Structure formats: C-alpha cells, structure tokens
Amino acid sequence: MKYEHLPHIDKQLTRMKIVVFSGAGISKESGIDTFRDEDGLWKKYDCAQVATPEGFDANPQFVLDFYNQRRRELLQAEPNHAHKMLAELEQWHDMTIITQNVDDLHERAGSSNVMHIHGELKKVTSSLNRLDPRCITEYPLDVPIKLGDKAADGSQLRPYVVWFGEYLSGMDPVYEQIKSADIFLVIGTSLIVSPASYLINYAHAEIPKFFINPEDVSIPADMEYIKAKATDGIDLFIDKIVELTSY
C-alpha cells in the first residue's frame, strides 16, 4: 500500500532495525479511549472493579460488559496515519513494534511484527490460567463474551488482557528486540508508568532515540523530543530516518 508521505523517498536507504514502543496516544487519534488521560476510562470506572482478578471474581458480568464495550469500539475504529506510516516503513527497514495497546490497529495498518505486552482485545482466555496456550483463542469482536462461555479447560472465558496485579509474561523477547535496535522510537506514551518507564533502558546508549508526544514530559537526555501528536510527529520522524539512513 502507498500513503501520501512516503513517495518522496527516492533515495537509497541503508536498511536498519527500527524498534517502536507505542502507547495509548497513537490509538487515541483513531477514537480509542485511553485509560489515564483526564477524560480517560479510569476517570469513569474504578479500575479495581473492571481490571483486576478480584473485580472479575466479584462481578464477572460487569467486567465482561466493560470489555465487550471496548471490543465494540475497536470494531468501529480504523488505523490512523501514524499506524499506516509505521507499517509503510517495512518497505525500507526491519520494523518491530512493541505495544502497550490491546487493539489490533497496528496489524490492520499492515505491520507484520507486533508484540503485545498487555494482551489483545480480539482474544479470550481461561479465567483460571490466562497463559494456558490451549485457551488463548481469537474471538470475533462483534460477538460479546457471555457468562457461561467456556475456555478449553472448562473455566469461564475472560478477555486476554493483563489486569492490575497480573505479571507481564514473555518479556525476554521484548528486551532482546530493544537491545538489538539500531533506532528506537517511543510514540504515544508518557514514559511515566511501568513498563514504559524502564523498557527504554534496554536500548543501546549509542543509537538514535526519538520520542513523539504532544505534552511536556521529562525524558532521558539522549532522546530527541518530537513534540507533536502521533499523526503529525510520525512524518517528522520519517524525515529524520531518511536523513540518518540515506546514502
């Protein structure tokens, strides 16, 4: 696919490994509600009630309703310019996207190597063991998860997302991807909350690092700040990548 910003790349580019760490800000521009913004979901809902194992045990119907609504919203959302540009960069570079987002907008935009560290809304799993590979399955976004729907182990189905109090699994491959990056981009996250606050430390000290965010945020001195929303900042980032890799 072709998009409006990239046809100007008519130079020979050195192929680089670009690792992108994305957060809620990139999908906010596609209409996906964030969690921590002033108008985010945690201002409307108690996260202890809808995003913890204890909340699910206490009122599974309430939790399922919450996530079924998120799933319906995702069904209506579309990838935006930032998602599309990251996918388009695969023509020239080895791209890996590590995302905190539970939507599939990176994949729908065309990115082929996406690592979800907080799970995926389009999947369900066991309420007894969320990491049981037998129970992690695709589930149509337009089909609500209902009480009585069973996982392969006979337990109630639940969304395949990481709740508060649950550990992040399978992080070693994530660390290795960041360690091997030639260029590292953070987009749509503030770097305040874990794991964003520590993942950047795995990037090699000498590589170019970029940070796209419209707000005033304190970032490491070795990162270049592109103060813009994701859909504007991505074009500025691409211009910098062309400068760094063209010959």
Image (cartoon, grey):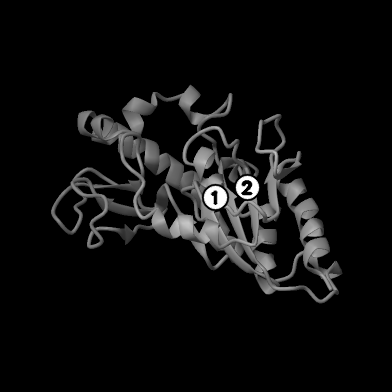
Q: As drawn, which residue projects farthest toward the front? A: 206
Numbered tag placed on residue 76 in the rendering = 1
- Mark 2 surroundings within 10 Å by alpha-carbon count, few (fewer than 14), some (14 through 19), many (20 or more): many
Quadrant position of residue 201: top right
Q: Residue at x 67, y 68 (%)?
A: 16
Q: Nearer the viewer, residue 217 or 122?
A: 217
Q: As drawn, which residue projects farthest toward the bottom? A: 12
Q: Residue at x 24, y 30 (%)?
A: 54
> How far apart are labels 2 and 1 at the CA level?
26 Å
**In-image side of 148 versus 216 (left or right):** left
Q: Residue at x 62, y 55 (%)?
A: 79
Amino acid under label 2? Val
Amino acid under label 1? Gln
* SS type, badge 2: strand
The quadrant of the rendering that contains the N terminus is bottom right
Label 2 sits on residue: 186
Q: Which percent across, then down, holds residue 234?
A: 73, 52
Q: Nearer the viewer, mark 2 or mark 1?
A: 2
Q: Which percent across, then down, holds residue 71?
A: 43, 47
Please say whether residue 223 is visible from this viewpoint: yes
**Are the residues tagged 2 and 1 within 8 Å (C-beta)?**
no
Q: Which percent across, then down, holds residue 142?
A: 41, 53
Q: Nearer the viewer, residue 138 or 174?
A: 174
* SS type, badge 1: helix
**In-image side of 203 versus 216 (left or right):** left
